[in-house]
Image: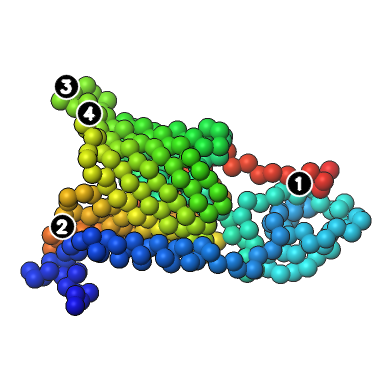
Amino acid sequence: MTKLRDIIINKDGFMDISIRPSRIFLMAVIILIPCTWLSGQSPMTLKKPVRLILNEGSELVGAIQAEEGDTIRFLTAGGLYLAVPRSQIRSCIALPGRIEEGRYLRPDPNQTRLFFAPTARPLNGGQGYFSAYEVFFPFLAYGVGANLTLAGGMSLIPGATTQLFYLAPKITLYNSDRLSLAGGGLYLNTTAAFEEFSGAGIVYGVGSYGTDRAAATLGLGWGFYGDDFANDPILMLGGELRVSSSVKFITENWFPPKSEAYPLSWGVRFFGDRLAADIALIYPAGVRTSGFPFLPWLGFAYNFGLSEKPVDHYGP
């Protein structure tokens, strides 16, 4: 029987996770089953959350329980019942998240991506984000209609005589509360013309299953160089697990065909209503390392076009 230590430490004393098909299957089970089970759980939630803005400027987050003439019965996220006169309400804004177990859970504004890889979820029309990966690789994405995402950017590496530019369209073919299916591509080229390089990239299909509590993403991609496409696809397995109103754990793992190197990554996302920051460690499994074996990953994103919707029959 294979021991855990034998998987992690090779006979020479180096960290060396050799990923065989059986272990890829095991990793898929470890990621997919917990995410699928957790996404199917239904914790007690309140009615659709709103933000009440009162005339004096204070704000209340909770759910409207009842309307009685000139008074509304309001339950705050913390469980406090209030009777609020309509005349004291400046406005009432519907919130995109939910109230669960005494707290307001905002949605992850960057649910269309893991660290680098896309999920199958679309950007809504008019929504978008500006992000920077590893500081030097900015990225801009924008939602067109309900299913099309257009994205791209250009590297900003100091002192480089040429830069990379990249285009990354994605179309979501199916999108429901739990399941999304999409296809897209990533095209890379340089700002300087090189006869021996005519561009490279990947075309892919991806599926995401789950909720904002927990979700799993599986993708298959075919790399290309110029006009030549790979015969075998690269496999991507990813997972998300929310642990608080503003924090989720993420894993993203790539399994190239016929390769002994497999990038595995684990990290955390911190997010607010519009900002998100990813911090992760990438481990090159199958690569002999004698020192610190992890590569750090940093990503930041600002989201725009996330409009709040007023509830029409409240406020002036």
The residue identified by callout 2 is: 287
At a point 40% along the width and 46% down the height, the residue shown is 206
Quadrant in which the N terminus appears:
bottom left
* Helix, strand or loop at mark 2: loop
Where does the image place residue 10, in percent across and percent down from the top left?
Answer: 12, 69
* Helix, strand or loop at mark 3: loop
Q: Mark number for residue 311?
A: 1
Q: CA distance from mark 3 to mark 4?
A: 11 Å
Quarter of image, res 292: bottom left
* Among the two numbered marks 4 and 1 on one chain, the one whose residue lies closer to the N terminus: 4
Up-down relation of residue 301 to residue 240 (above or below): above
Q: CA distance from mark 4 to mark 2?
A: 28 Å
Q: CA distance from mark 2 to mark 1?
A: 56 Å
* Among the two numbered marks 1 and 3 on one chain, the one whose residue lies closer to the N terminus: 3
The residue identified by callout 4 is: 226
* Among the two numbered marks 4 and 2 on one chain, the one whose residue lies closer to the N terminus: 4
Question: In this image, 253 relative to 5: left or right?
Answer: right
Where does the image place residue 125, in percent across and percent down from the top left?
Answer: 56, 35
Q: Are marks 2 and 1 in contact (CB under 8 Å)?
A: no
Q: Are marks 4 and 1 in contact (CB under 8 Å)?
A: no
Judge depth for marks 4 and 2 and give the one in front.
Answer: 4
Q: CA distance from mark 4 to mark 1?
A: 52 Å
The residue identified by callout 3 is: 195
Which amino acid lies under the numbered mark 2 shown in the image of this protein?
A: Val
* Among the two numbered marks 3 and 2 on one chain, the one whose residue lies closer to the N terminus: 3
At a point 19% along the width and 69% down the height, the residue shown is 8
